[in-house]
Image (spheres, rainbow, N blue to C red):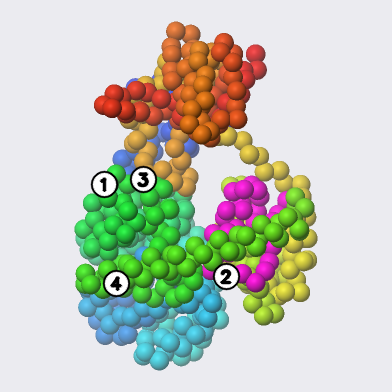
């Protein structure tokens, strides 16, 4: 499927910005409607960000300034994932630099649960705290906020999760100030993660010092898989550079223990090398010391904690592998190709999120994985684009003890007696919903339009990630001049279209077969291949079919 645009308008965009027509189509296909929007997306700048445009920031900044002035104890309550941990590290380190009397607490996943709990408030009280600031949590923690107030402790909530809605009315905790883009009138900040929200609060207090934390906000943003729109690109573009060439010792060591010696950082380096190590302690143990690691300036402490991160990640991997084996057996016995995957068992609650994510990609449907805990079960859910988990959970709220999260990633707690009914209702809700697994093309092109200049233009979109994937192009009716299988399961092809010739490679496509002279349609990403000092243009195939003519 390709988004088609008026040819004259494409030419206008192309000439105005001095870009190729195919690249202009890519940008328009991504919802960028005019020259200004395209320019801002390609040239993201922190100057675009005015933190005071986000509801609650001004009031929160004033409260914090007064707390620092009066030497009131500030207690930061963060979340145990990479988003909450980086946000907590930034805010704690920043407030220390301002001279605040501040401490932080990262709840234990099993003992405390997600968010601001009664236990966390009790800890704050025992430390003499007068102000609690949440990071990446709190928007639905009504009981804990009320309890804190009863103890004489006020609360500032910084969060980005969905607020509670009752008949479309947003219900909020009784906090002094709430910063959450989901309740702000300014929609351009809607995609911020928890660390991004905390960063805007820091910007409001001291814009210059805030720039020191762009590496951490980049990790939090990428880890939470929020859309990399113009605002998030403004944050992670400069932050990406600070990770490629680290100034922060902890990031340098994290790259080193992950085997990343190159200065060229790609999205998969973050997703599969750096972020899992930051996330691991919060999944299998306590993540309190991750904050120490991120902001420490003591080399011996950083190296000690780096080895601890490696150990925690190894534990996480072993638990996940064992759980996946058990779930595979359960799928064989219980899964009947229902429209929603709902499974439960005696599994570690710290890995239900990653497991549900893997199963969602495999089955292309919503997945709920519950960990049994006495008379209750705690679960994580993931869903493909186009499915709103919050809508499913809201329609099942009479069966749930609590729930929260996002449209594509959520969590819930349920009584064991309601699990089977939840499975039935969730499946009924999705019974008539067709999830179309259609390859989304950014532009239809002739291969004569595909050149090294287009490849260079595509690099302007980096870093790629959620909501900003690498572009995929489509081209029809190409003749197969040469076809051969290479390696263990790959193919190479020489293709022609009119008088143009291109070379293509298809990884893990060894089961396909096309005779020379046949006509095919392809979906691909263009790339420049370098081998022994020779550069050549190569089409990296994503899908192939025989031409329909």
> Could you give the CA–CA distance between mark 3 and mark 2, rounded to whole angstroms?
30 Å
Q: CA distance from mark 3 to mark 4?
A: 27 Å
**357 on left or right of 207:** right
Name the element at disc 2: helix
Secondary element under disc 1, as helix, strand or loop, is loop
**Which residue has dot 3 on it?**
266
Q: If you read the primary sequence from the N terminus, does the residue marked by circle 3 or circle 4 appear first?
A: 3
- Mark 1 or 4 closer to N-term? 1
Relative to 103, say whether 546 is above or below. above
Q: Are marks 1 and 3 in contact (CB under 8 Å)?
A: no
Above or below for 232 versus 544: below
Residue that label 2 marks: 349
Q: Residue at x 43, y 57 (%)?
A: 223
Q: Residues within 10 Å of mark 2 (few under 14, many from 20)?
A: many
Asked if one can make out residue 214 in the rendered structure from this viewpoint, the answer is no
Secondary structure under badge 4? helix
Q: Decide: is 475 above or below 330.
A: above
Q: Nearer the viewer, mark 1 or mark 4?
A: 4
Percent across and percent down for residue 25 are 45, 28
Label 3's element?
loop
Question: Where are the magenta residues, as a range?
Answer: 339-367
How far, Cα to Cα, is label 2 from label 1? 36 Å
What residue is disc 1 on? 263
């Amino acid at each position: 499927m390709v988004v088609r645009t008026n040819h004259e308008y494409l030419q206008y965009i192309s000439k105005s910005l001095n870009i190729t027509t195919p690249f202009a189509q890519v940008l328009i296909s991504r919802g960028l409607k005019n020259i200004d929007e395209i320019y801002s997306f390609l040239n993201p700048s922190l100057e675009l960000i005015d933190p005071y445009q986000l509801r609650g920031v001004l009031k929160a900044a004033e409260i914090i300034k007064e707390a620092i002035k009066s030497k009131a104890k500030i207690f930061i309550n963060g979340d145990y994932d990479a988003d909450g941990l980086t946000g907590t590290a930034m805010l704690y380190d920043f407030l220390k630099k301002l001279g605040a009397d501040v401490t932080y607490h990262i709840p234990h996943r099993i003992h405390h649960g997600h968010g601001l709990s009664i236990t966390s408030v009790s800890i704050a009280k025992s430390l003499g705290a007068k102000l609690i600031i949440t990071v990446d949590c709190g928007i639905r923690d009504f009981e804990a906020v009320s309890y804190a107030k009863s103890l004489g402790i006020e609360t500032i909530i910084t969060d980005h999760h969905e607020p509670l809605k009752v008949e479309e009315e947003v219900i909020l905790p009784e906090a002094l100030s709430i910063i959450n883009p989901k309740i702000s009138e300014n929609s351009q900040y809607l995609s911020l993660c928890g660390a991004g929200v905390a960063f805007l609060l820091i910007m409001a207090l001291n814009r210059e010092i805030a720039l020191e934390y762009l590496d951490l906000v980049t990790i939090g943003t990428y880890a939470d898989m929020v859309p990399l729109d113009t605002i998030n690109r403004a944050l992670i573009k400069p932050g990406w550079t600070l990770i490629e060439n680290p100034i922060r010792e902890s990031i340098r060591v994290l790259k080193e223990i992950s085997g990343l010696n190159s200065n060229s950082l790609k999205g998969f380096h973050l997703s599969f090398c750096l972020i899992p190590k930051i996330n691991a302690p919060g999944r299998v143990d306590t993540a309190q010391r991750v904050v120490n690691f991120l902001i420490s300036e003591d080399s011996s402490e950083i190296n000690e904690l780096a080895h601890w991160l490696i150990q925690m990640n190894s534990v996480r991997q072993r638990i996940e592998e064992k759980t996946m084996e058990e779930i595979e057996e359960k799928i064989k016995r219980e899964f009947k190709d229902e429209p929603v995957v709902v499974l439960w068992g005696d599994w570690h609650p710290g890995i239900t999120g990653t497991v549900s994510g893997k199963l969602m990609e495999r089955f292309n449907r919503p997945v709920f994985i519950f960990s049994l805990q006495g008379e209750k079960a705690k679960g994580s859910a993931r869903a493909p684009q186009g499915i709103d988990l919050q809508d499913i959970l809201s329609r099942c709220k009479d069966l749930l003890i609590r729930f929260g999260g996002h449209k594509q990633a959520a969590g819930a707690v349920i009584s064991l007696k309601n699990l089977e009914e939840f499975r039935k209702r969730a499946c009924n809700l999705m019974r008539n919903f067709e999830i179309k697994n259609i390859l989304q093309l950014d532009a239809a092109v002739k291969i004569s339009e595909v050149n090294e200049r287009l490849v260079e233009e595509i690099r302007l979109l980096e870093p790629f990630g959620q909501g900003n994937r690498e572009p995929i192009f489509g081209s029809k009716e190409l003749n197969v001049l040469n076809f051969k299988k290479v390696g263990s399961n790959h193919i190479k092809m020489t293709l022609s279209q009119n008088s143009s010739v291109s070379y293509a490679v298809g990884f893990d496509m060894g089961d396909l077969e096309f005779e020379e002279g046949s006509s095919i349609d392809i979906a691909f990403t263009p790339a420049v291949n370098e081998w022994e000092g020779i550069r050549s243009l190569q089409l990296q195939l994503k899908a192939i079919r025989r031409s329909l003519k």
